[in-house]
Image (cartoon, coloured by chain):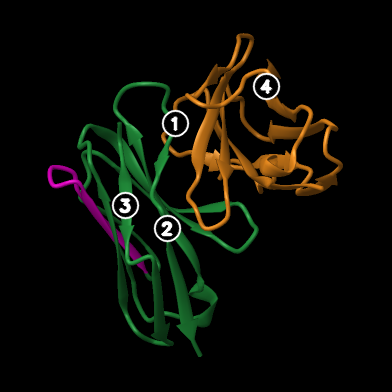
Chain colours: A orange, B green
Amino acid sequence: GAVVSQHPSRVICKSGTSVKIECRSLDFQATTMFWYRQFPKQSLMLMATSNEGSKATYEQGVEKDKFLINHASLTLSTLTVTSAHPEDSSFYICSARDRQGIPEAFFGQGTRLTVV
Amino acid sequence: KQEVTQIPAALSVPEGENLVLNCSFTDSAIYNLQWFRQDPGKGLTSLLLIQSSQREQTSGRLNASLDKSSGRSTLYIAASQPGDSATYLCAVRPQTGANNLFFGTGTRLTVIP
C-alpha cells in the first residue's frame, strides 16, 4: 500500500513558539491532503483540506492564521502551529489521497504535540 | 452533516472469542466506508475498505459488511487474539465534497489472554 510519512512523531514546545509538522507521500502523488486533530478519548476531526498549489480550506472553528498549511508540491504538505498554547496540545495526523483516484485514504503516523 | 457513531465504546473479551463491532452513519450518500485500527499514540492502519456498491469485504480473520440504505456497517473479528487489542475506527467518505473522511468515535477493544 501507499506510504505517508509524517514528522516529527512527537514534539514538546514552549507556549508561544511555533511548530511545523510535515506530511509526505513517499510513493505516490497527492493533489489533496487532509489534516485531522484528535483530542484524548475523542475521534479524529478534520481541520483543513490542503490542495497542491492553492490555499487550504479550513473547517468551521479552525483558525487559519493559527494553523498555517502549505502544500507546495504533490508530495509534501506542512502544518505550522503558530504561537502554540497548551490547549493546542493534541494528536495531529495527516492523510493523503492518490491523484490517480485510488479510493483508499492513507494516513501518516501522527504527531503528538505537547505545549508546556 | 454526516455523523458516525460506533457501539460499543469499549469491549473486553477473552482470547478466542468472535466479536462484532458496530458502526452507524446518518447520511447514506457515501462513496465508501473504511475500517481502521489505531494503537495507543499511533497513527491509523487501514483494515478494510468497502465501496458503496459492495456488501462486504474480507481480509483474514476480519469481515466487514455494509448496509448503506440503513446506514450501518459491522466489523466481525474471528478468533480474537491479544494482538487485536486496539481502538477500531470506522470512517465514511461522502459521495460529494472534498473527499475527507468522517470518523466514528471508536471502539476500544481489549482481548484478554
The image shows residue A103, relative to residue A49, as above or below, that is below
The kind of residue on which mark 1 rests is: Asn
Residue closest to the eye, B106 or A5:
B106
- The spot of residue B72 in percent (x, y) is 21, 51
Most distant residue in the top direction:
A54
Residue span colored magenta: B62-74
Cα–Cα gap, marks 3 and 4? 29 Å
Work out how far the residue at label 4 is from the one at label 2, CA to CA, in angstroms. Answer: 27 Å
Which residue has dot 4 on it? A69
For disc 2, the marked residue is B106
Residue found at the very far left of the displayed protein = B69
Mark 1–mark 3 distance (CA, rounded to whole Å) = 17 Å
> Principal SS element in the magenta part?
strand
**Numbered disc 4: secondary structure:** strand
Tell me which residue sits at (22%, 36%) in the image. Answer: B27
Q: Mark 3 packing: few (<14 Cα in 10 Å), some, or many (20+)?
A: many
SS state under label 2: loop
Q: Amino acid at mark 4?
A: Ile
Chain under numbered label 2: B
**Circle 1 sits on which residue?**
B100
Q: Which residue is nearer to you in this view: A89 or B43?
A: A89
* Residue A49 versus residue A4 in the image, above or below: above
Question: Is there a contact, CB below 8 Å, between mark 2 and mark 3?
Answer: no
**What residue is disc 3 on?**
B5
Identity, as a three-letter code, of the amino acid under mark 3: Thr
